[in-house]
């Protein structure tokens, strides 16, 4: 299998209790099957086993979760913002989400793509202020690809188009606004080759798109309330944001054939930064609120396609 990572990936380091936020607070913590199987092997007299058993529950999607403590804190997060499960049985036995956060892993047949998300403030600061265009490193491993139903021709088409998208975003001879317009044009053209895409007319204000039904951090709502519409700055940070969304989501169109919505995410990501704060913390808050909430992300994906304010032509008018 080929593993692909951004060049900055190796530079990420969790700062644990020194973090200005906590990845163990605000959202549900899922317990995956592998971790649950290990917990059952622990001696029932151990305090950590008893604590685990006391907080296991099911959510409305029938996922096994840990019941959160007050202020939506993970029940294993101590006063120093350190994980007591990690301390007791080792980080390798914490849930998969905890072991991998803020990393994301996407498998496409014989290719695995790995990255880090803006939902971690340390990762957000690193990516937001990254100096240079997004580039990648690859390595070959002995791991065999899992069975999949990816259409090879669609995957190749999308991968080639994504390379074009990266080139568009890296063209520093043009203002980021022009690069994003060309990115939208690329998305429209590619979408027409995949399947029909009907943009909607749901009447919702741009600001209200970001009023999430599941609020994780009240600071985000304050950002939305204080939205200021202003021109987009031609900064490397805006290029980094757009490239992040293209890397993380573009190839997922191999499964749903909806590439235009993925392109819109890149454009709207720059608008989020511009209107709500213009700093890494703002993008971090949005990511934690949206990318890590199934409720919020499902709603956002729906609005990308159906909200009139997020129609391709409307976004172009904003960019002009």
Image: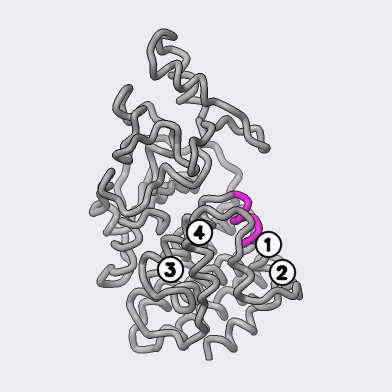
Where's residue 107, x and y in %? 47, 46
Residue labelled with disc 4: 218
Q: Judge left or right: residue 300 versus residue 21.
A: right
Label 4: few (<14), some (14–19) or many (≥20) C-alpha neighbours in 10 Å: few
Q: Residue 306 carries which label?
A: 2
Q: Magenta segment, principal secondary structure? A: helix
Q: Judge left or right: residue 273 versus residue 293.
A: left
Q: Which of marks 4 and 2 is in front?
A: 4
Where 272 falls versus 294 (above or below)?
A: below
- Provide the secondary structure element on which disc 3 rests: helix
**Residue 111 can be seen in this image:** no
Magenta stretch: includes residue 216: no
**Residue 296 can be seen in this image:** yes
Residue labelled with disc 3: 163
Closer-to-camera residue (193/51): 51
First reached walking from the N terminus: tag 3 or tag 4: 3
Q: Which mark is residue 302?
A: 1
């Amino acid at each position: 299998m080929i593993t692909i990572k951004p060049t900055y990936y190796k530079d990420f380091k969790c700062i644990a209790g020194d973090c200005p936020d906590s990845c163990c607070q605000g959202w549900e913590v899922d317990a995956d099957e592998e971790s649950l199987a290990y917990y059952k092997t622990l001696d029932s007299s151990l305090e950590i086993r008893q604590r685990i058993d006391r907080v296991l529950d099911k959510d409305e999607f029938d996922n096994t979760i840990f019941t959160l403590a007050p202020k939506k804190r993970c029940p294993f997060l101590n006063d120093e913002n350190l994980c007591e499960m990690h301390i007791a049985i080792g980080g390798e036995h914490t849930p998969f989400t905890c072991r991998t956060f803020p990393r994301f892993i996407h498998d496409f047949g014989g290719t695995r793509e790995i990255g880090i998300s803006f939902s971690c403030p340390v990762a957000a600061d690193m990516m937001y202020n990254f100096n240079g265009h997004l580039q990648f490193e690859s390595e070959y491993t002995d791991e065999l690809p899992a069975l999949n139903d990816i259409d090879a021709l669609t995957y190749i088409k999308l991968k080639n188009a994504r390379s074009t998208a990266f080139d568009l975003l890296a063209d520093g001879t043009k203002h980021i606004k022009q690069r994003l317009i060309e990115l939208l044009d690329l998305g429209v053209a590619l979408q027409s080759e995949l399947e029909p895409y009907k943009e909607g007319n749901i009447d919702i204000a741009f600001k209200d798109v970001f009023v999430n039904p599941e609020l994780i951090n009240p600071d985000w709502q304050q950002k939305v309330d204080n939205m200021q519409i202003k021109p987009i700055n031609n900064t490397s940070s805006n290029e980094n944001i757009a490239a992040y969304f293209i890397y993380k989501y573009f190839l997922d169109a191999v499964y749903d054939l909806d590439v235009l919505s993925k392109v819109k995410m890149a454009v709207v990501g720059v608008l989020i930064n511009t209107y709500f704060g213009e700093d890494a913390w703002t993008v971090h808050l949005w990511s934690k609120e949206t990318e890590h909430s199934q409720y919020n992300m499902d709603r956002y994906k729906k609005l990308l396609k159906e909200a009139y304010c997020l129609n391709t032509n409307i976004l172009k008018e904003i960019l002009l």
